Amino acid sequence: MLKFINRKIAFQWMLLLGLLTLSVYVVITQAQLSNEQGTVFLYKNFAHFFSQYEFFGKGIIIAVLLLQVVLLQYYFTKNEFTAKNSLLPACFYLSILLLTKSLITISPSFFTLLFLLITISINYATSSAKLKINAFWIGILIALGTCFDLSSFILLILVMATLIINQFFKIKEIGILLFGVALVYFYFFSYFFFTNSYCDWILEFQQIKILGILDGEILTRTSILISLIVLGVIYMYFIIRTRLINESKVVTQRKKVVTFNTCAILMLACLFISNSAYPYILGYLSVPISIYLAILAQEKNPLFINEIITILTLFLLWL
């Protein structure tokens, strides 16, 4: 079935439109925000706005979802992870969001995925002057992302790693990147300071909690622990298998794969610093898993191994 879908771009369009329609329907009829306790102030402000203007709030969520799908497809196509065009990344992404109920309970990770996709879609292979401008705006975007979800700080490490891996690394670019982050926080601090509410702003950061993955029943239910262990093994298989597939390709393509694998590894760190609980926390892995599944779907394999792994991965995410 997976081979058939992979060969038929028209069927992929039908599948994508169906999943997108279902996703929008789920958002309109069921979407709600997760508990805002321990979250950052911009997420709290959005939660307050959502409670007052639910219709417009759901419109923003749908707009973010559409932008995520477009950016995911753009990133996949730009990096030429497969020889032919494919809509499977978007199809897998929407499927994972639905299976993990990430569109029913909107957690901070939903916004982190947007900033992640923007960050990795930026062109780093450009002139020195353009790279400096990009670094500045990326710093601003990452800082805004951390105001929705503290886990977005991982994106700062991701950008630095990207610059180093692709040999674009210069001290000036890193400095400009950090300056963009500092500028946003300086702006917010100035605003709260002049409105005489900076103490409340600082207190919000003191109330932030991490290791949300340990909340709930994750430590008491053996089935959840086993599924997470198996999912972790499959995730490492994705990283190793993708590296082996691209080992014989040109240096530029190998660097793209190494950069993406680094991104996938760093997103694992979000599981341990986020305040989101299981299963919503698995949303952080939806972008890497979607791309890995789309890459492996192109590969010929005996005994339907890729099909089995795909079904098993989606099943474990659904549990």
Image: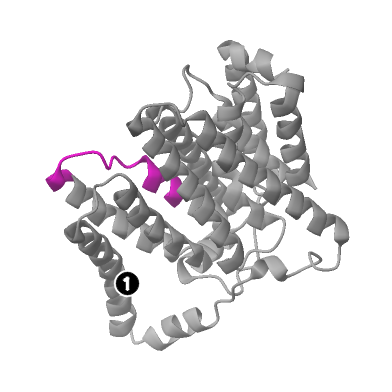
Q: What amino acid is at disc 1?
A: Tyr
Comparing 133 with 293, the one in front is 293
On screen, residue 222 versus residue 96, left or right, reads: right
Residue 274 to residue 244: above or below: below
x and y percent of residue 170 in the render? 20, 56
Measured as percent of width and height from the top left, residue 302 is found at 72, 20
Does residue 178 sit above or below 257 in this rendering? below
Location of mark 1 (residue): 185
The answer to whether residue 105 of the structure is visible from this angle is yes
| In magenta segment, residue 125 | yes
Q: Which residues are magenta?
A: 115-130
How many badges with numbers are in the image?
1
Identify the main secondary structure in magenta. helix
Residue depicted at 31% across the width and 84% down the height = 193
Dividing the picture into quadrants, the one containing residue 281 is: bottom right
Magenta span includes 117: yes
Q: Secondary structure at mark 1?
A: helix
